[in-house]
Image: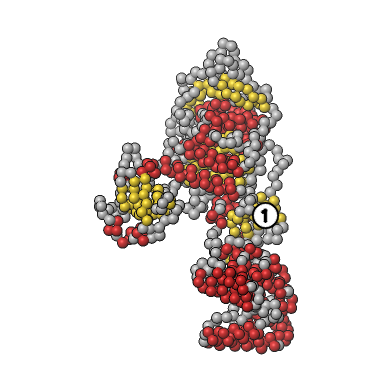
Amino acid sequence: MRKVLKYIFLSMLVVALSGACGVGIYVWSLMGELPDVSKLSTYKPPLTTTIKSRDGVLMAELYRENRYLGDPRQLPGFVRKAFIAAEDDKFYDHAGLDFQGILRAALTNLKEGRFAQGGSTITQQVARTLLLSREKSIERKAKEGILALKMERQLEKDEILNLYLNQIYLGHGAYGIEAAARVYFGVSAWELSIAQAALLAGLPQAPSRYDPYKNPAQAIERRGYVIERMFENGWITAEETEEAKRSPLGLKGYSNPFEDVSPYYSEYVRQALLERFDVDTVLEGGLTVTTSMDSRLQRAAREALREGLKEIDLRGGYRGPVRVLGELEPGEAPLSLEEEESPFFEGEIPTDGAIAEALVTKVSEDEVTVLSGAAVARIPIKSLEWTLPRRGELKDIFVPGQVLLCRFEAIDGGGLAAGIYQEPLVEGAIISLDAATGEVLAAVGGFDYNRSQFNRFSQAKRQVGSAIKPLIYAAAINSGYTPASLIYDSPIVYESDELDKKWKPKNYSSRFYGATTLRDALVNSRNVVTIKLLKEMGIQKTVNFLRKLGITSEIPLDLSLALGAPSMTLMDLAATYSIFATGGFRSDPVFIKKIEDYDGTLIEEYQPGNSREPVLDPAVAYVINNIMQSIIKEGTGRRARGLSAPSAGKTGTTNDTRDAWFAGFTPKIVTVVWVGYDDGASLGSKETGGRAAAPIWKRYMEAALAIENDPGDFSIPPGIEFARVDTESGKLAGPNSKKSFNAAFLAGTVPQPAEPAHTALVKETPEEKTLDFQDPGALDLLR
């Protein structure tokens, strides 16, 4: 009661002060204690920075106060009237203070014995929020009233309402009506209905008490009060009043777009903004950032990566139950388990597509029965075959009392089916660029951002394995070799004082193939031929060539370079492979297309370079491109073939299958996929780039090409000739050629016809040739 009496006293004081407002304003002004009202004309509060995809999908919001600046004068009239009805229905009539309202509020509060009603006008609330501190005192209350009178003389009513509707806090981190409309209903403020506007208008008095998510009944009651006030003031009709009252809350259920759309991509952009601007500009500047991301391709990349990692994980075998609660005796009822298992009998029944824990209650020859939330589901043996050892039975793996993580699906006729859900431990990443511009169309840095925020497309430097080979062979073509040049694939030994034992590199198949054309060596990823080729060209010369292509990663000055010892990020490798897709032009990744200020002023915009110089002779780039197309058609990348557009690519696998790569491209899109464990553990002896990474690449590219209506074709630059070559001799193919291939050549380098009496030159060199080797960390078995 003491607080109520104090409130009445303050109210009377404000009334008394207003009677002598001229003197009051003069005194306060002389004392220099009143804030300058004129600064409200340049009002610029902290605003939300938005990050959007190129097709307009919201990716992330960055803010200290979630606020979007708007002009309420452009809103439907009933939206503005809803707030006026709730807070100050004499707004357009008073001069800043509503004396009747103050006295009415005081009497109501005295009657209720609590602060049931406030007496502040909208103008006073703006003064308090924008010009004064939060201190509760008689002095502040007096200043509030005086400032309200000054504001009314210097600002238009609509300007004051504009300040109010942009500044007011409406709960759940939303400041201003625009942010609140998005948070509560998923619409813009101009799209609000009468019922929605009334609900928002009821929040300023007590956002927590009237929170529709936590207290829906109180929120509906408050909404009804606002609707009635609108009707009593003649701002809506009786029909509109009844319809608004009957309307359900219709809440959207706010979810953070950062986590839902593209967390790894958005986080990369956020860090890039912080490198470009100060933190206040990023979190309060209201920037609009348009990225290169296509939300459709991003969704496809995320799905392709996640599904691919799940398949790899399943091939690795079943890791067992989540835990074991205690075994049931044959025929014993599940309810005999301890009380701690009660959630399995009394919890919520899983919905279609839900992932939840389930208790094994019965195991038969052809199915496992589980219980979750009092719902019984059966897992058929067909979906459990991957968990079983050869010739194994279900009872060898599953027993009652085990807790499994299951995915549930609704079945026709009611009921649920279940399958074991095993979240992959293996990680991976994918990045996809516009080949010509480098704009990053999609990028995913891991299986689950909530599990690990480490961004593998930008931060993980991993050995690239045989994905380096197209670059080595480009150096060879640039140095005068041709796709038909022969190098003997035969045993060779490298030794040095730094090696514990002799290094005997071999191919993935552990076989040697004799005289081999460079084209076949690259198509089939021959390790020994590549090592010999690098040795012939010269390591330093090759490294210099790679530097000219734009590779900045550390490159070892030894023969391990031939097998992919350099470590690169997916971004680096994608940019490098764009050289082959574009005819010699390197396209470095571009994540941000455009940045605009809060008022739409352009700050910066990415402009694709039309006058840039190629980093590689276009003809050399096309020769390698042509060979890489054959890698997919018939080589180590066969699992990626079958696309609706011309495609080229290369697999990569490092020692002990610690890393699996597939890097490839169509005429317009360059995509790189990496799979591996963060700690460098082996993926398993068979999980090569062709098996683990290529299917993910293909799954994504199929979706991307379905979206891209014009996939295009690889353009053939001047200075290219085509010829059919005898695989064994490296000469032009003739009628007696047993095996041959078509290849692109630099003009003037097409091989000569074979001699009429030619016989095959393929002879495997029996002896081992010994050469010096410098690196004790050499890789082998790479493909």
Given residues 105 and 273, the one toward you in this image is: 105
How far across and how far down the image is residue 60, in percent?
59, 56
Residue 21 sits in which quadrant? bottom right
The residue tagged with tag 1: helix, strand or loop? strand
Residue drawn at x 35%, y 59% is: 345
Can you say whether 78 is above or below 509 in the image? below
Residue 730 sits in which quadrant? top right
How far across and how far down the image is residue 180, in percent?
59, 66
Q: Quickly name the residue at label 1.
A: 595
- The kind of residue tagged 1 is Ile
Can you say whether 274 is above or below 303 in the image? below
Q: Can the viewer see residue 265 in this picture?
A: yes
How far across and how far down the image is residue 108, in percent?
57, 84
Given residues 200 and 606, the one toward you in this image is: 200
* Farthest front residue in view: 239
Total marks shown come to: 1
Residue 393 left/right relative to 651 = left
Given residues 232 and 298, the one toward you in this image is: 232
Residue drawn at x 34%, y 60% is: 342
Residue 538 sits in which quadrant? top right
